Amino acid sequence: MGIHQYFKSLSDLEKIYRCPGKFKFQEHSVASHSFKVTKVAQFLGTVEENKGNKVNWQALYEKALNHDYNELFTGDIKTPVKYASAELRNLFSQVEEQMTQKFIFKEFPKEYQQIYLDRFKEGKDDTLEGKILSVADKIDLLYESFGEIQKGNPEPLFQEIYEESLLTILEFKEMESVRYFLNEVLPDMLDEKFIEHSELNKVTQKIVKANLEE
Amino acid sequence: MGIHQYFKSLSDLEKIYRCPGKFKFQEHSVASHSFKVTKVAQFLGTVEENKGNKVNWQALYEKALNHDYNELFTGDIKTPVKYASAELRNLFSQVEEQMTQKFIFKEFPKEYQQIYLDRFKEGKDDTLEGKILSVADKIDLLYESFGEIQKGNPEPLFQEIYEESLLTILEFKEMESVRYFLNEVLPDMLDEKFIEHSELNKVTQKIVKANLEE
Amino acid sequence: MGIHQYFKSLSDLEKIYRCPGKFKFQEHSVASHSFKVTKVAQFLGTVEENKGNKVNWQALYEKALNHDYNELFTGDIKTPVKYASAELRNLFSQVEEQMTQKFIFKEFPKEYQQIYLDRFKEGKDDTLEGKILSVADKIDLLYESFGEIQKGNPEPLFQEIYEESLLTILEFKEMESVRYFLNEVLPDMLDEKFIEHSELNKVTQKIVKANLEE
Amino acid sequence: MGIHQYFKSLSDLEKIYRCPGKFKFQEHSVASHSFKVTKVAQFLGTVEENKGNKVNWQALYEKALNHDYNELFTGDIKTPVKYASAELRNLFSQVEEQMTQKFIFKEFPKEYQQIYLDRFKEGKDDTLEGKILSVADKIDLLYESFGEIQKGNPEPLFQEIYEESLLTILEFKEMESVRYFLNEVLPDMLDEKFIEHSELNKVTQKIVKANLEE
Amino acid sequence: MGIHQYFKSLSDLEKIYRCPGKFKFQEHSVASHSFKVTKVAQFLGTVEENKGNKVNWQALYEKALNHDYNELFTGDIKTPVKYASAELRNLFSQVEEQMTQKFIFKEFPKEYQQIYLDRFKEGKDDTLEGKILSVADKIDLLYESFGEIQKGNPEPLFQEIYEESLLTILEFKEMESVRYFLNEVLPDMLDEKFIEHSELNKVTQKIVKANLEE
Amino acid sequence: MGIHQYFKSLSDLEKIYRCPGKFKFQEHSVASHSFKVTKVAQFLGTVEENKGNKVNWQALYEKALNHDYNELFTGDIKTPVKYASAELRNLFSQVEEQMTQKFIFKEFPKEYQQIYLDRFKEGKDDTLEGKILSVADKIDLLYESFGEIQKGNPEPLFQEIYEESLLTILEFKEMESVRYFLNEVLPDMLDEKFIEHSELNKVTQKIVKANLEE
C-alpha cells in the first residue's frame, strides 16, 4: 500500500502487450509505447516552437507520459474492441477511469491525490499539447503497424491500423508539426529499401566477380 | 469471411495469455487452458460415472471446450477486473457475448448459427456438466497459481487466486468428483517435494563420500 | 504418484513444441494443437450431422482430445523422423505406447486404468469419428504450415508438410465434411490478402492526397 | 536519413536489454527503463514541489527521458564494465557521446541540431533536476535488482547492484524526495510478503477444514 | 544438397532445446551445450596434461564438438526416455545413427564421407579422450541441473539429473581431472551464496543506518 | 573464485546475443556462434588437408573455440561500433583484452594462467589456422545475415553485414577451402527456394484437381 505499489505498477506496464491476441513479429509493451510517444511528442513540440507557437512543455510531457497508464487495469483491449462499436469503447474507458481513481485513493497520500487524478485524466483535448499527444500516439501506432507490414505480417488488421492512424494524423493537417511529419518523415518511411532475394543474387555475383578477377 | 475466419481465430487463442500484466514464470494461453480444462473435466466426469451418476458427455465436452472462446474478443481481463467489482465483470461479460454473437452472424453459414450460439453460451449452469465445468476451470486455475507460488513468484495475486479457486471448488464439495479431488489429488499436490539448497549440499556430500570410499 | 501427476502432465504438454529444431515464426505446443484439433473436429462433426450422418460425439471428443497425449514421453519427433522411413516411425509409436501404458499403470487407480488405456489408444480408425480425427489433425497442420509460408518462412519443410497434409485430407474426399472444407474453407484460406509494399505506397499517397485536398 | 531514422531508433531502444549476459527472470529494455525513470522522477519532483522547492519541469522531463539514449550505440555495457574500472567506464562514455553527436549531425536538420545536442548531454548535474534524475535512475535500478532477488535469482551481481543503488540514493539523503523515499517507500518494498510453501500447506488445510465442516 | 545443407543444419542445432517438455528457467540448445562441453573438455585435458598424461587434442576436440550432432534428427529425447528403459534408449541411438549416416551419404561429397562418418560416431570410448568427453558432458549437465535447482525449479527431475550426473562423474574418480573437479570446482559450486530475503532486510537497514548517521 | 567461475561464465555466453539492439527473426548467442564457427572451421580445415596442406588441428580448434570469449565482458558491441570508426573498435578490443586478463589472474590457478592467456589472445593471425578462423567467422556471419534477409528482415544493416562478410571471405580467395566455399557452398545457398504465395495457389489447385478427378 502506498507509493511503493505505484512504483511497482510501472513494472507491470512492461508486461502489458499492445494489440494482444494477434500474431506479431515484434511485441510492444505499454511502457515502451509511452516512452516512444513522449519522445515523438517532444520532437513535434520542438517543431511547433521553432515555427513560433508557444508550447507548455510541462503539460505536454505529463499528457504523453501518462496517457495509457490506465491500461494497467484492463490491458490494451481498445484496439480490437474499437473495431466493434464506439459505445463499447466508451464503456471500457469508463471502467479504466474508475479503476484508476480507486487506485489513486487507495495508494496515494492525500496531498498527492488531486495531482495524480489530473495527470491520469484523458489528455487528448483541444489544446496544442492535447493535439500533439493525439498525433504522437498515432505516429507511434503508424510505426508499429508499418513495422509489421514491412516484415511481412499477413494479418489485415495491421493495414487497417496503418490507414486509420494515417487518417487521424491527417485530421490535424493544419498543425506545423503534422506538415513537417507529412513532408519530411513519411516519405523517408515509405522509401525504406526492401531487400529482395533476386537483388541478393545479383549483388553476390557482382562482388564475387569483381574480387576474383583482380 | 466464413469458417476459415473461425479456424484462423483458434490460432489467435494461442496468442492470448491469461492474467496479463503480471510477471509470471510460465505463461498460459487461452488455447492451452481450454485444453487442460477439458481434460480435467473428462477425468471428473469419469469419477462421477464410476460413482453411478449419469454424465451427458457431449454436453460436458462442449461446455469445457468452448467456455473461454469469447476471450478472443477482449482477452483475459476478467481476473484483474473481477477483483475490482462484480458489476464491472458483468459489463465485460455482456460485451464479450455481443461480440461473439456478431462474429457468429458474420462468419457462420445460416444452418450452423444457432448451434454455435448455443455452444458459446455460458456453460456454468446447474446441471452436473455445468458444475463439473465450474470445478475443472478452478482446478486448472489452482494448478496455474500453485505453479507460480511453487516457483517462488512473489506476486500476492497468485495466492489470492489460489485461495479463491480452492474456495470455489469447495462450494461443490457435495460432488463425488470434488471429494475425490480433495482426498486424492490435493494432498499429492501439497506433498510436492521442494528442493532445498541445504539438502543439495548434504546429498552431494553423501554421494561423493559413498563413491570415493569404495 | 496418482492423478496429481496426470494433471501436472497436462502442463508439460504446454512445453512440448511441435516440429522442434526448425525455425518457426510461431510456435505451437501439443496442448494448443490438441485444443485446435478438437475444435475443428467439432465443426466437421457438425457438418456430418447436418448432412444426415450419425456422429458419436463422445467418441469423437475423446479421440481428438487425447490423440497426441503420448507425445508427452517423446516429444513431437514424428514429423522429421517420418520423412526418413515408415519403419522408424513405427518404432517410435511403439515406444510411445509402451511409455503411456507404464504411466497409466503407475499413476492411475485400478478402476480407471482400462478407461484410460482405451482413451490413449490410436484413435485414427475406420469409424466416422476416426476419419474425422484424421482430417481435423491434418487441417490444423495445414493451417500451421500455411501460417509459416504466409509469413515468409523459407524452410522448404513447411511446403512439404502443407502438400502432405492436403494429400491426406484428399484421401477422405468422399466425406461430406471434407467436401465442405475443400469448397468453402480452403478457397478463403488461399484468398487471404497479402500486403505488398508497393500497395502500401499507393494506399498512403491516395489517403494523403484525398485528405490534404479537402 | 532524417527524422525518420530518429523515430525508427526509438524502436531499437526496445530491443536493447539492460545488464546483458546475466540470467534474469525479467528483462528490461532501455525504452521501458527510460519510461519508468521519467515516471519516478515525476513523483520525486512532485514531492520536492510539495515541500516548497521550485522544480523546472521541462528540464526534469528532458533529462529523464533522454538520459540513456546514447546506449543506442553501444548497448548497456556500463554495468559490468563499471565494476572493472572507472577509467574504462569513462572511455565508453566518450565513445557513446561521439556516436550520438555523429548521429545528430547526420540525421537532424540544422535548425534542431543544437537542441538535440543539449538534450542528449549528460543530465546528472548539480541542479535539483540533475539530482532528481540521479536518484530516479537508481530507484529504478533498485527495483529491478530487488525484483530479481525477490524471485530467487542466485546471481550475486544483483545484490551488488542493489547495495550500490541504495548507497547512491543515500548520497542524496538531504533531498526531501529522498527522505520521502527512504521513509515511505523503501519500508513497504522490504515488507513485501513472501509466499512460503509451508504457509501454503497451512492456508490450504485451514480453508478446506473450515469449508468442509460447515 | 551438399555442404550448404550441413552448414545450415548447425543453425537447427540452435533451435533444439535440451530436456524438452519440462519447465525450465533457462533453456539450453544443443549448439550451446556442445560449445560448453568442448570448453570444459579443454580444461579437463589441460589438467591431465599438466599431471603428465598425454592428450590427443585433435581427437578430444572432435569428440566433444560432435558428440550430440545426431540429435539434429530426433531432438534431445534421451533424457526422459532413458528413465524408462535402457532398451528404449538403445533403439533411439540406432535411429539417430542411421539418420546421421543417411545425411552424410546424401549431403557430403565422396571424399569427405568417411571422415564425417568417423566424426559422428559415438565418442565416449575407453581412451583418455573418450573418458574426458564422458566427464565433460556430465559436468555441463550438472551445471544445467544445478542452475535450475538454485533458481528454485520444483521439478524433481532436475535433482535426479543432478545426482545421476554426479554419480557418472564419480565413476571416473581415478582420473586426475575428475579429482581436480571434485576437490577444486565442486566445493565452490556448492558454496554459492544464496540471497535470502531476511538477509536483504538486514543489509538494507545496515546500509541505511550507516549512511544516515554520518 | 576459481575454475567454477570460469565454468559458470560459459553459461553467461549463452545469454549474450549477437548484434544487439536490432530487430532479428532469430537470435544467436555468442555460445552458439562459437560452436558453429568451430564446426565450420573443422570443415574448412578438412578441405585444406584434403588438398595437401598441413593443418595444426589443436591450434585451429583452440582459436575457433575461444575467439569470442572476451565478449563475456563487453557483449557483442563490435558490430555497430565498427561501422563508426576503426579507432573506436580498437579501444573496445583493448578493454576486452584487459578484462580477460584480469579474469584469468583472478580465477585461474597459477599453473594454468599462461595457457589461458595464450588461448584467449586474438587468434586471427597469418598462420593457416588463423586464416581459417577469419574465414569461418565470416561464413557464420554470412549465414546469420542471409537468414535474416531470407526471412524478410527489412533492416539494411543485414545486407551491409552480408556484403562485408563476403568481401572479407574473398580476401582469402587463394585458399583452397575458400575456393571450395565459393564454388560448392555459396551457389547452393543462393539457390534456396523461396516459397511464393502465388506458387502456393497453383500447387494447391494442382493437387486438389489431380486427386478429385481420380
Image (tube, coloured by chain):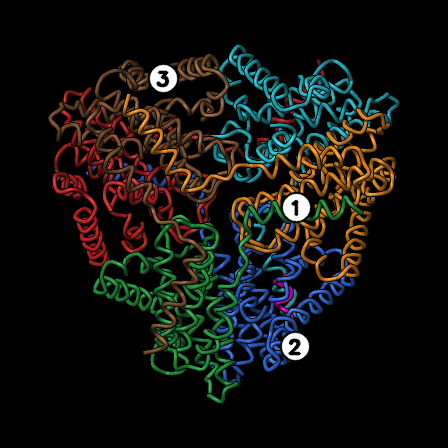
Chain colours: A orange, B blue, C green, D cyan, E red, F brown
Count residues near mark 3 (Cα–Cα under 10 Å), then give few for <14, some for 14-19, many for 20+: many
Picture quarter with the N terminus of chain F: top left
Mark 1 belongs to chain: C
Q: Mark 2 points at which residue?
A: B125
Please state the horizontal and vertical placement of residue E103, each as a whole percent of the image: 21, 49
Residue furthest out toward the top: D87
Residue type for callout 2? Asp
Q: Residue at x 63, y 41 (%)?
A: A143
Q: Main secondary structure of the magenta part?
A: helix
Residue type for callout 1? Thr
Q: Which residue is drawn at 64% across and 58% down?
A: B76
Q: Is residue A130 left or right of residue C79?
A: right
Count residues near mark 1 (Cα–Cα under 10 Å), then give few for <14, some for 14-19, many for 20+: some
Q: Nearer the viewer, residue D23 or E85?
A: D23
Q: Can residue B182 be seen in this view?
A: no
Picture quarter with the C terminus of chain F: bottom left
User: What range is drawn magenta here?
Assistant: B165-171
Q: How many marks do you count on the picture?
A: 3
Residue E133 located within the stretch drawn in magenta: no
Please state the horizontal and vertical placement of residue F88, each as a whole percent of the image: 48, 14
Q: Nearer the viewer, residue A131 or E56?
A: A131
**Is D1 situated above or below A171?**
above
Real-space CA distance between mark 3 and mark 2, rounded to the nearest whole angstrom: 68 Å
Q: Which mark is residue C204?
A: 1
Q: Residue F104 carries which label?
A: 3
Q: Which element type, helix, strand or loop, lies under badge 2?
A: loop
**Is D104 situated above or below E163?**
above
Q: Image quadrant of residue F203?
A: bottom left
Real-space CA distance between mark 2 and mark 1, rounded to the nearest whole angstrom: 51 Å
**Is E168 situated above or below D204?**
above
